[in-house]
Image (spheres, helix red, strand yellow):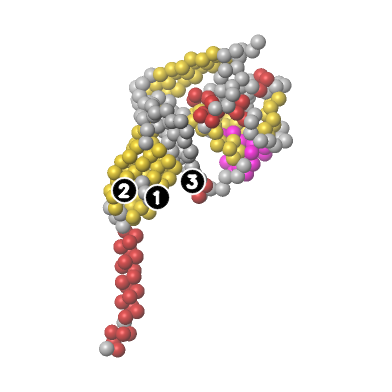
Amino acid sequence: MNFKILHLPVFLLFLSLCITGQTLAQEGTIRGSIFEKETGEPIIFTNVYLYKTTYGAATDVNGMFVISRVPKGTYTLMVTYLGYDTLRMPIVIKGNEVINKKLYLKTSTISLKGISITSTAHVESKTETRTSVVKITPRQVKQIPAIGGQPDLAQYLQVLPGVVFTGDQGGQLYIRGGSPIQNKVLLDGMIIYNPFHSIGLFSVFETDIIRNADIYTGGFGAEYGGRISSVMDIRTRDGNKKRLAGKIGASTFGANLLLEGPLKNKQRLVMEVRLSFFL
C-alpha cells in the first residue's frame, strides 16, 4: 500500500507528459499560395481562414500564407478578397501534418451596393517592427484623381504626410525636411537615380507593372544604408503566365505601351515602353 502511494506522483507526471505529447501531435499546418486564375499573378494581402474558427492568416507580397497549430479535424478553408469570388474548400487535418495548397481565385462578376470589410493586422506585424512605413498597391494609386488622365506613383506620394514635391530641375522630392539626395529609390533591388519626370507630376514607374511599394520615412534597417531621409522599395509584378496580353494608353502629357506574356522556358515577361512629352 505504501509503495503505490509513493509512486503515485511519478505515475501522474508520466501520464501528463503522454497526454501533452499526444495533444501536440494532433496539431497540423496549412500553407500555400493564392493566384489570380486569369493571369497567374499572386494576390497579395488576401484573407485565408478556417470557417467558424479563429484560425487564419493573410497572404504576403508573394501570395503565400501559413496557418499553423491547427487541431486535427474537418474544416472548410475559405479565401475572400474584394473583387474576386469567395473560394471554399474542405480540409481534413490529421495529427502532425503539413498540407500544401495552390489556390486560384476568379474575378468576381457581382456588383455590390455596399460592403464593410475588417481584418486583422498583417502577419508581418507579429514578427517585425515596421514604424514609419506606408504600403502602396496599384489599386490604391488608381483610386486618386489623376492629373493628365493616367494614375501615377508620384501623384500618390504627394498626398502622404510629410512629402513635398517641387517641379524644378526634373521634379524634386522632399520627405520630412530631408534633401532629395537623402532619398533612396529601389526598383527590384536596383537603385534608380532619377525617378521623376519634369514638373514632378509623373514617375518613371508605370502603375500597371508595380506589384507593391514600401515607402519608409524613418526606422529602416541597415540593408537600406546610404540614405538618412527615406527609402522607396518598389517591386514589379511577374506578368501574365497564361497568354500574351497588352495595354496602350495616352494622355495630355505622355503615352505608354505595355506587353506581357509567357516565354518558351515558362518564365514570365513584362515589357513596358513609355513615351513622355510636355507641352
- Return the residue at label 2: 75
Q: Which residue appears at 40% of the width and 42% of the height?
A: 48
Q: Quadrant of the N terminus?
A: bottom left
* Crowding near the residue tagged with mark 1, few <14, some 14–19, many ≥20 C-alpha atoms within 10 Å: some
Do the residues under discs 1 and 2 have CB atoms within 8 angstroms? yes
Q: Quadrant of residue 276?
A: top right
Q: Secondary structure at mark 2?
A: strand
Q: Residue furthest bottom?
A: 2
Region in magenta: 217-233
Instruction: Provide residue 39's location: percent of width, then percent of height.
Output: 38, 26
Q: Which residue is mark 1?
A: 55
The CA span between labels 3 and 1 is 12 Å
Q: Earlier in the sequence, mark 3 or mark 1?
A: 1
Q: Is residue 23 above or below residue 105?
A: below
Residue drawn at x 64%, y 41% is 218
**Which residue is at a point 67% across and 39% down the rendered structure image?**
228
From the top left corner, tell me how far across and down residue 5 is, in percent: 31, 85
The numbered mark at residue 120 is 3
Amino acid type indicated by mark 2: Tyr
Alpha-carbon span between mark 2 and mark 3: 21 Å
Where, by quadrant of the figure, is residue 274 drawn?
Answer: top right
Q: Nearer the viewer, residue 51 or 124?
A: 51
